[in-house]
């Protein structure tokens, strides 16, 4: 059963006249007659009878009509979907992201993306960077947003540098000073988060390099909990700039400079399989959204979902 046969059947039923249906379809009358004959042979029964009023549906034709209409509509919908896929306006995009990226950066990116491509189905997988790499290599994730990891099977695109910043609650003595030395942190309580993350090791490495260690520590398993503890005046913390951008802008936390040390930075990258081939349109459209965010995030500013990404 061919599409041309279904289209011919429906047009004849609509026009009630073979010659007018042929003209509407821009085919000759013999060609349209041949299409109808082929369809009737396949179904094993006549679909029309000729009368002085033109082409009238038989009982079989009337029964077949709604199925033919639904079939043609489904094919047109499929054709439209393929056209949208070519434009990157539909399809599926599966992303993987490290926890800090998925919580503090990805929502702003996806807000931009969905505004431009509302028909794309989004799936987000989260995990530590090493876990996301495995998902990308197994082709379970199209794009991963992770800290920089070198692997021969990955195509890597740098996005931004996320640095650790020292944050304290308003009214803390450090806030009044504006900047301190690293050794001064040893005199206050330090809040650490997530032993399994690279941030934890970066924080310890910073203190080891200066030969100091905080005397009092609270350890938590996530950044949000650490922010709450700092906000309640229970200690100070070195947290990713992207994670505290909103609190700093609102004055709920205060950033304090460290005079004698450079806070660690992590490079955040987008990765896909090196052998993935040309990007699908949903992936290419996502990479367009990624364009221009590096400067914003490296400065510790949040992504504004209302602004269009720069090319």
Image (cartoon, helix red, strand yellow):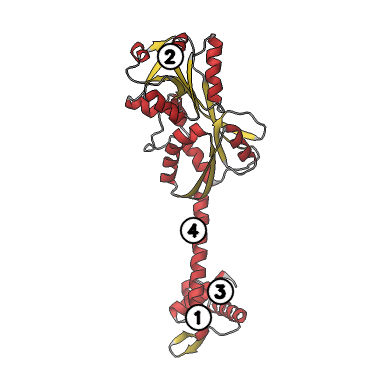
Image quarter in which the N terminus is found: bottom right
| Label 2: element kind | loop
The residue beneath circle 3 is: 5
> Where is 279 relative to 263, above or below?
below
- Looking at the rendered structure, the secondary structure element under dot 4 is helix
Residue 185 x/y as whole percent: 45, 12
In whole angstroms, how far apart are the C-alphas of marks 2 and 4? 63 Å
**57 and 220: which one is in front?**
220
Q: Say which residue appears at 52% left-offset and 60% top-offset.
A: 78
Q: Nearer the viewer, mark 1 or mark 2?
A: 2
User: What x and y, as percent, mark residue 264?
Assistant: 51, 19
Mark 2 or mark 4: whose residue is earlier in sequence: 4
Q: In the displayed structure, would residue 290 be above or below residue 21?
A: above
Mark 3 surroundings within 10 Å by alpha-carbon count, few (fewer than 14), some (14 through 19), many (20 or more): many
- Residue at the image point whose x is 61% and y is 83% from the top: 44
**Sequence-wise, which precedes: disc 3 or disc 4?**
3
Which is more foreground, mark 1 or mark 4?
1
Q: Few, some or many C-alpha atoms within 10 Å of disc 1 (few <14, some 14-19, many ≥20)? A: few
User: Real-space Cα distance between discs 1 and 4?
Assistant: 27 Å
Q: Which of 115 and 145 is in front in this view?
A: 145
Q: Is residue 17 above or below residue 144?
A: below
Q: Where is residue 18 in the image (x, y as percent from the top left)?
A: 49, 81
Residue at numbered disc 4: 80
Q: Name the residue under label 2.
A: 188
Q: Is mark 3 on a helix, strand or loop?
A: helix
Residue 168 image position (x, y, % from top left): 39, 19
Residue 244 visible? The answer is: no
Question: Residue visible at 47% across and 16% down?
Answer: 216
3D distance between C-alphas at marks 3 and 2: 81 Å
């Amino acid at each position: 059963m061919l599409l041309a046969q279904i289209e011919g059947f429906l047009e004849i039923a609509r026009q009630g006249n073979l010659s007018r249906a042929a003209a509407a379809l821009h085919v000759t009358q013999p060609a349209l007659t041949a299409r109808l004959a082929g369809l009737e042979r396949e179904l094993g029964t006549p679909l029309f009878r000729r009368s002085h009023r033109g082409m009238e549906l038989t009982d079989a034709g009337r029964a077949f009509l709604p199925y033919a209409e639904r079939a043609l509509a489904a094919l047109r919908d499929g054709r439209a979907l393929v056209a949208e896929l070519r434009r990157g306006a539909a399809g599926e995009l599966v992303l993987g992201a490290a926890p800090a990226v998925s919580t503090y950066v990805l929502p702003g990116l996806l807000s931009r993306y969905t505004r431009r491509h509302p028909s794309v189905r989004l799936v987000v997988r989260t995990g530590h960077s090493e876990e996301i790499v495995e998902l990308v290599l197994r082709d379970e994730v199209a794009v991963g947003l992770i800290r920089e990891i070198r692997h021969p099977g990955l195509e890597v695109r740098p996005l931004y540098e996320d640095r650790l910043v020292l944050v304290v609650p308003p009214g803390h003595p450090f806030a009044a000073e504006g900047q301190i030395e690293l050794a001064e942190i040893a005199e206050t309580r330090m809040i650490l988060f997530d032993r399994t993350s690279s941030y934890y090791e970066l924080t310890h490495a910073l203190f080891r390099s200066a030969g100091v260690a905080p005397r009092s520590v609270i350890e938590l398993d996530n950044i949000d909990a650490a922010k709450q503890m700092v906000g309640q005046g229970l200690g100070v913390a070195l947290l990713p700039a992207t994670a505290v951008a909103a609190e700093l802008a609102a004055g709920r936390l205060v950033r304090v400079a460290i005079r004698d040390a450079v806070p660690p930075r992590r490079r955040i990258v987008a990765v896909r399989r090196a052998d993935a081939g040309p990007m699908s349109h949903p992936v290419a459209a996502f990479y367009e959204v990624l364009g221009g965010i590096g400067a914003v995030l490296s400065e510790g500013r949040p992504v504004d979902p209302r602004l269009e990404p720069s090319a």
